[in-house]
Amino acid sequence: IVDLAFEQVLAEIERLGGIALPSRMDKTPYRKAIIKKLVEEYGFRAFDLAYYPESIQYFKKNWPKLKFQLFNFSSATALAQVGNRHSRVKMQLPGFEGIKVLAGRESESVVS
């Protein structure tokens, strides 16, 4: 448990040159309820989805004009799951810098 506000944690991650990627936010109704705030107040445009491709429609319906990077990573809880998922993405820059551009947050929030 972290005894800091979300804004503080996010600021520290970014201060250290990292990125935050919300993961499995579509897994439960409780988690799904916070997606709107992550998109509109914090500018998140990349998510790791539990129910891919089903959850894509949620993003298209609620933010039809925004472009998202939606992934489905494996948690690999068993040895047989290691390496069973892969994605191809086109990045502007190679390596971690390209991932930071691809999964980075928008600087301004969106008001619907």
Image (tube, grey):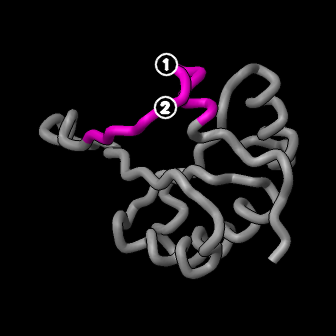
Does the magenta portion include 99? Answer: yes
Q: Quadrant of the C terminus?
A: bottom right
- Image-quadrant location for residue 12: top right
Q: Which mark is residue 91?
A: 2
Q: Secondary structure at mark 1?
A: loop
Instruction: Estimate the x, y position of residue 37 in percent, counting from the top left.
Output: 76, 66
- Image-quadrant location for residue 15: top right
Does the magenta portion include 8? Answer: no
Q: Which mark is residue 74?
A: none
- Image-quadrant location for residue 2: top right
Residues 12 and 96: in front is 96
Instruction: Estimate the x, y position of residue 91 in percent, counting from the top left.
Output: 49, 31
> In the image, is residue 44 above or below residue 61?
above
Q: Distance of mark 1 from mark 2, alpha carbons?
A: 7 Å
Q: Quadrant of the N terminus?
A: top right
Q: Which mark is residue 94?
A: 1
Instruction: Estimate the x, y position of residue 51 in percent, counting from the top left.
Output: 37, 66
> In the image, is residue 52 above or below residue 112?
above
Q: Which residues are magenta?
A: 86-101
Q: Is residue 2 left or right of residue 56?
A: right
Task: Give amino acid for label 1.
Answer: Pro
Residues 4 and 45: in front is 45
Alpha-carbon neighbours of circle 2 within 10 Å: few (<14), some, or many (≥20)?
Answer: few
Q: Residue at x 57, y 50 (%)?
A: 46
The answer to whether mark 1 and mark 2 are in CB contact below 8 A is yes
> In the image, is residue 11 above or below residue 35?
above
Residue farthest to the left? 80
Q: Residue at x 40, y 61 (%)?
A: 50
Q: Is residue 27 left or right of residue 80?
A: right
Alpha-carbon neighbours of circle 1 within 10 Å: few (<14), some, or many (≥20)?
Answer: few
Task: Give amino acid for label 2.
Answer: Met
> In the image, is residue 12 above or below residue 94?
below
